[in-house]
Amino acid sequence: MKIVRIADKTLDILTTILEYMMGIMMIALVCITSIEVVLRYVFNNPTSWSSELARFLLMWVTFTGSSIVTRRCTHLTMGLNIHRFVGGKVSRRIKVLVTIVIAVIMFVIAWYGAKITIISGHRIAPMTKLPMYIPWSAMPVNAIIMTLFLITEAIKQFFTKEGEEEE
């Protein structure tokens, strides 16, 4: 169980880094959008690159936010709570199974997202002149991070004894 605690602390550090990155991206997104609004509607002189860069930042913010809520286990869930109808052992097994299935799905998303990014990433964005692998890599990078978070969560759920509190 010590390895799980070490992995958990490491992933907590990664989550903190993601939170800071997301904060910086959100500040940049708000600043770019605000400057564009002022330039467009006050000075009637819009920029050509701001909407494209804002779109790219929004992609990264979306996927980074998904990684953060995956780590915190705060994604929205269905209203039916099956765990009320089954015992503690079965409930834990269901949680582990669901977490593993989601981790596999995230790995598949990361795999195919990386393939698409590699195949088409050489294109250049028309206004910002950024290679398209920069915005498109948001999906595979964060899907890999989510897979790590989910695997760690599944291991914690599997080895947590019934009635034992998590730290």
Image (cartoon, rainbow, N blue to C red):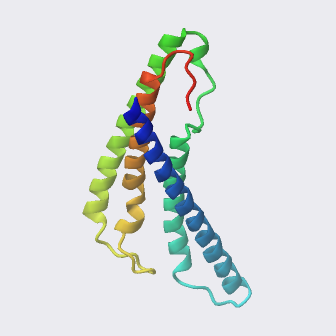
* Image position of 118 with respect to 13: above or below: below
Residue at 45% over, 46% down = 11
Q: Residue furthest front?
A: 2
Q: Position of residue 77 (x, y in %)?
A: 58, 32
Residue at 44% over, 17% down = 93
Q: As rendered, which of 51 and 135 lies closer to the eye? A: 135
Q: Is residue 144 left or right of residue 30?
A: left
Q: Is residue 97 left or right of residue 79?
A: left
Q: Position of residue 59 (x, y in %)?
A: 50, 60
Q: As rendered, which of 138 and 91 lies closer to the eye? A: 91
Which image quadrant: the C terminus? top right
Residue at 42% over, 65% down = 135
Which image quadrant: the N terminus? top left
Q: Is residue 96 left or right of residue 165?
A: left
* Image position of 108 with respect to 41: above or below: above
Q: As rendered, which of 128 and 18 lies closer to the eye? A: 18
Q: Position of residue 55 (x, y in %)?
A: 52, 67
Q: Position of residue 82 (x, y in %)?
A: 57, 16
* Image position of 97 with respect to 125: above or below: above
Residue at 53% over, 48% down = 68
